[in-house]
Every structure is written in C-alpha cells, then in structure tokens.
Image: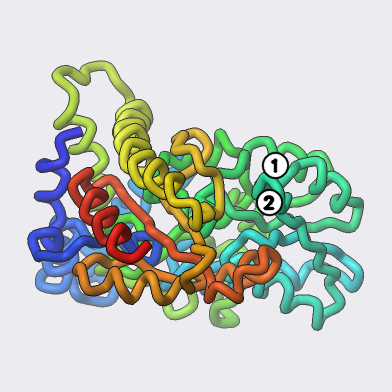
Amino acid sequence: MDIEFVRKQFPALEKDFIFMDNAGGSQVLGNVIKRISGYLVHHNVQLGASYKISEEAGNKLKYATSKIAKLVNASRPEEVVIGSSSTMLLRLLSLSISRNWKNGDEVIVTNTDHEANVSPWTDLEEKGIVVRTWKVNPETLELDISDLRKLLNKKTQLVAVTHASNVLGTINPIKKIAKEVHKAGALICVDGVAFAPHRKIDVKELDVDFYTFSWYKTYGPHLAMMYGKYKQLLKLDSLNHYFIGKKDIPYKLQPGNFNFELTYSTLGIIEYYEELFSHHQDSHKGQTYSEKIAKAFGLIAKYEQKLAAKLLDYLKTIPEVKIIGNPVADFNKRVPTISFVHSKLKSDEIVQKVDAFRIGIRFGDFYAKKLIQDLGLEKNNGVVRVSLVHYNTTNEINKLIKAFQTIF
C-alpha cells in the first residue's frame, strides 16, 4: 500500500504525534472537512422549501444517503437511519421496537459488547423483558455459537452482538450467527463500530436486521448510521412528532432531523475508498462498485495485518505481558485493535509513561465493562489498548516498541 498517498489525505497526520487510539476516534479526511465547510457556506438552509438553494441542499443529502446505502449494500436509501452516535441510535431502536414486545419476551446480549449495544436492552428489564447474556469462552476469548443455541428459545425477540470487539479485536462470524438467530425466529442487531474502519460491510450478505457504526471512527465527523431492513423498520413505532407516522422511514427515527453538513461530508469517506482502489490499480474497467470497495478494504486488511503482526510479535516476547484476545494477526480473525495487561505494572502506569513519547494509546474498559469484570481485569485498571488503522506506519510501530522497551 502506498502509505504516503494515504497519509496525505489526513491533515492531522502532518503534526508530530502518533495516533494509536483510533478505536476511540480516527483522524478525519481532508475531503470530509472540505465538504462540511462547503455545505455550510453554500447550502446551510432548512430542507423542504420551494426556493432553489433548499432544493439543491435536499438533492445533495439524498445523494449522500443513497451513496451510504450503496456502501453497505442496503436495498434502498430509506434503510439508512442517521443519528448523532451509535449509542443514541441503538437506544432509539430499543425504545421503538420494545413497544411491540410483551412481558416475558426475551433479548440476548453478550458480555463482549460495548455498552451501546447492551444497556438499551438490559434497561428493558424494567418493562418485564427478560435479558440473557451470551458469555465469551474464557479460554478462547471467543463467542461459541453452541452457547448461543442454548439461550435461544421461542420467546427470544432479538440478539444484540458486536461484529468486532473493541477490546479483543476478535471478528465474530455474523453471517453464521444471523442464520442461527433467524432459525429461532428472532432478529439480530449488530454493533459494527469496531469493524467498520477495517473491513467492507455488506448487510445483505450478512443478512442482519439492524447494523450500526460511527463515522467518527471511520475517518469522518461525529455522526453515526443504522441500517435496518425496510420491512423491520416499517414495523417500528414513530419516535418523532405525532403527525409523523410509521410509514415515514427513516424520519420517524430521526427526531429533530439529522445533521445536514455532517451527513453530506460522509461522501468524502466513500469517495476516498474508491480513490484508494483507483490509486493502486493500473486498470479497473469492468469492475463493479462493490468489487472496487472490496479490493480497497482488502488492501487495508493486508496492510493492517502487517502492522498488527509486528506489534503482537513483540508483545509475545515479554513474559510479563498477556495479550487479551487472539495473539495471531490474521485479518480473517481480528482487526488491529490490540489489548494487553502486564503482570507487574498497572495499565494506567504504562499508558502514562508512553504519553511522554507523543504517542496516543489508552487504558481502561472502553465501555466493555462486563468483559473487563468477567475476565478479572479491573485490578489492572483495565487493559492497555493500541488501536491501529491503515494510516499508521511500520516506523510508528517501531517507535511504540522503543517506548515500551523503556518501560517493561
């Protein structure tokens, strides 16, 4: 991968700092910034008016949402719900969908998820909804589908699961999980926040009912989207004004409307993936949009695997270090979000010493509190997490390793 080409697209990377807390929030593409500015300068009006600028603004936003739908392979733009964060979108979903559930109905959550896809469902216990927890295998640190089968029954309404853990980095087999969930007559809701920066999302291939991710972790602004199958969105009650009904999709789930300039700016991300593909291909005639995006993400996956392998190989040489997650950098099994603990040093001690090297990493539970508690890692003050993306470099990994060598 032409790393110089990649890094030129991100203005923040020009400063003397190494960003390795990307799972918390990635740096923003220059074209995204330009689109935000351009929209505010030229089209900062309310939608739905008869005058020309309002009509232009509406068309621009329709185009943006159609491109988002195409990116994730949704069937139609109406299947894309825009919101301020994945946390908020999942909360809205839980409030709406649970109106059609009855006392004794069940939901399954995991102990590997960020609370964004846990709390909205566990809070429904107040309404008489039974919540069951699908726990990670403590030995393999993976979710076993056999354990899910034991939890599923006729009362199960929905299974909430992450596509990739924001602590373990593990990629879960969502397509297989969805098949089991649907076989039981339930719905599946996937948190793709930790997966989306690293791999292509195809909601049809996965056969998911709901899927969320955040743009601010995929090189864009602080904004999120939720995909929902149209037939499932149609069933949901409106959370908007009384005169906005069930058929008003997705507006009924966007109270106060969505952020116009930030939504428009996501075009800068989608176009970047296409540019990444084009820059690395001599010829791309006859290839579909989906094939181009798949190849761009394939390039990202292979490059990130090299970065992850370098760091994981180093960490495995330190006897006091325990990697929390799969220790192998196979891009089919994990994303380059790497967590570990040290037997003699607290996680916060390590991170604070790394700060002096102008390298941004982090410690804690990362809102995956139940996982940290169940693995007994609270005594370590959580894990040390190094979260890489494809704009990081081998040289940056070397600098981080040198920093660790002064600490361990």
Which secondary structure lies at badge 1?
A: helix
Cα separation between marks 2 and 1? 8 Å
Considering depth in this image, is 117 or 243 the residue closer to the camera? Answer: 117
> Within 10 angstroms of label 1, few (less than 14), some, or many (20 or more) residues?
many
Q: Earlier in the sequence, mark 2 or mark 1?
A: 1
Which amino acid type is shown beneath numbered disc 1? Ile
> Within 10 angstroms of label 2, few (less than 14), some, or many (20 or more) residues?
many
Q: Quadrant of residue 104?
A: bottom right
Which amino acid type is shown beneath numbered disc 2? Ile
Q: Quadrant of residue 64?
A: bottom left
Considering depth in this image, is 378 or 283 the residue closer to the camera? Answer: 378
Residue pictured at 46% horizontal, 45% vertical: 316
27 relative to 270, above or below: below
275 relative to 192, above or below: above
Pinpoint residue 56: horizontal percent, then vertical percent: 20, 61
Question: Where is the C terminus found, in terms of image quarters?
Answer: bottom left
Considering depth in this image, is 46 or 161 the residue closer to the camera? Answer: 161
Question: Where is the N terminus found, in terms of image quarters?
Answer: top left
Q: Tell me the residue that label 2 is attached to.
A: 188
Pinpoint residue 250: horizontal percent, then vertical percent: 50, 62
Pinpoint residue 278: horizontal percent, then vertical percent: 18, 30
Which secondary structure lies at badge 2?
A: strand
**Circle number at residue 177:** 1
Residue pictured at 16% horizontal, 40% vertical: 3
Give the number of the mark in front: 2 or 1: 1
Specify whether 41 is left or right of 292: left
Pinpoint residue 211: horizontal percent, then vertical percent: 55, 53
Callout 2 touching callout 1 (CB < 8 Å): yes
